[in-house]
Image (tube, rainbow, N blue to C red):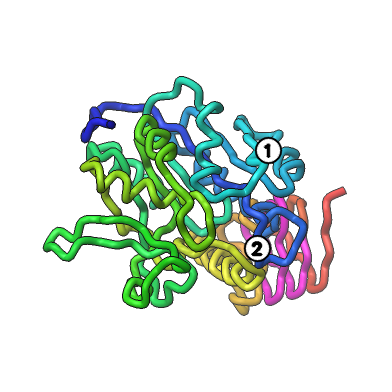
Amino acid sequence: MIENSVSKGNRPWASIILAAGKGIRMKSEIPKVMHNLLGKPLIGYVLGLLRNLDIVFKVVITGHGSDLVRDYLKKYDIKLVVQEQQLGTGHATLRAKAALGEFCGNVLIICGDTPLVKESTLASFMEDHAGSGRIISLLTAHLKDPTGYGRVLRSVSSKAQIQGIVEEKDATEAQRRVTEINTGIYAVDSDFLFYALDAVGCDNVQGEYYLTDIVSIAVSEGVSAGAVSAAAEDEAWGVNSRMDLARAETILLDRIRKSWMEFGVSFELYESVYIEPDVTLSRDVTIGPHVVLKGRTTVGEGVKLGAFSYLEGVQVPPGSIIPPFSKLISA
């Protein structure tokens, strides 16, 4: 049995990234987390989220296509663990126990196919958990169409306390009408996490060990648990299909372009410009219609990029005028 509260002091953080899924709906032999979104794999966005957060230990759980994931992770200070049999998210998370060793503190669990979560949202969620004294916290969101996502179950009392999570395949018709969904992001006390995972069973439609069951275990044992509805709808969507990938691209491109406009960049035919997240622009840059900017391209102040220009991994000096239909690629 785990105590109902923890110290509010500066407990260390570890993270577990779940990246073992085959991604059946992607119709691909490539691991789902290695599908590219604006020039980088999905898991690259999740690793980027964690880069500026105070996390001392990172573990990635991989399975299908683990060699591809391993090759990509070589440039990161991260521990990789292979889930040989895909028996569910609970089983995958339990595989991290040995890798974490004697670690004692808070564990952030996040899926490797969630590129839309904002760093500010994740940081606020971690801060909320650390200051709350809870044993387990769950990041949730409200979706207009929650189809395909696990639903958050709350009590009917005025406090609407969390009672558990039900996967859609196991949900009743009434439960499927719930719009609050599980984003798959948890903050959990390390001792309770592995204690609860040992108690998770596979009596469900899919015959899998669900990570979500640790919430109902916490509730049943009187352990402090809370659901924090802090993620916006466009952050909560994961990538499970090619259509999801296209939707994520649209959302991220819109965020990137708006961010650069706020910085002082002008776009002509705004929605036609393709720009990847590692591109660096300067103030008073003007970007013409249908321009493509890829890789670590750097564009100096006052540059004008003509329509249909293609730039990849190049540096454009300040004040330059790039004619329409130009193609500039680094050697």
Residue 14 in magenta stretch:
no
Residue 266 at x, y percent in the picture: 57, 69
Instruction: Tell me, yes or no, whether the two marked residues, 1 and 2, touch with CB atoms within 8 Å.
Output: no
For the point 77% across and 65% down, the residue is: 322
- Tell me the residue that label 2 is attached to: 275
Q: What element carries label 1?
A: helix
For the point 64% across and 51% down, the residue is: 278
Q: In which quarter of the image is residue 132?
A: top left
Magenta range is 286-311
**Closest to the observer: 164 or 190?**
164
Report the side of 222 relative to 190 (left or right). Answer: left
Residue 104 at x, y percent in the picture: 39, 25
Q: Quadrant of residue 115?
A: bottom right
Name which of mark 1 and mark 2 comes first in the sequence.
Answer: 1
For the point 46% across and 43% down, the residue is: 109
Q: Quadrant of residue 178?
A: bottom left
> From mark 1 to mark 2, how far is it between C-alphas?
24 Å
Q: In this view, does 224 lie above or below 147?
A: above
Q: Judge the density around disc 2: few (<14), some (14-19), many (≥20) Cα neighbours within 10 Å.
A: many
For the point 37% across and 42% down, the residue is: 187
Q: Judge the density around disc 1: few (<14), some (14-19), many (≥20) Cα neighbours within 10 Å.
A: some
Question: Which residue reaches farthest front?
Answer: 203
Residue 257 at x, y percent in the picture: 56, 66
Q: In this view, does 236 lie above or below 76?
A: below
- Tell me the residue that label 1 is attached to: 73
Q: What residue type is labelled 1?
A: Leu
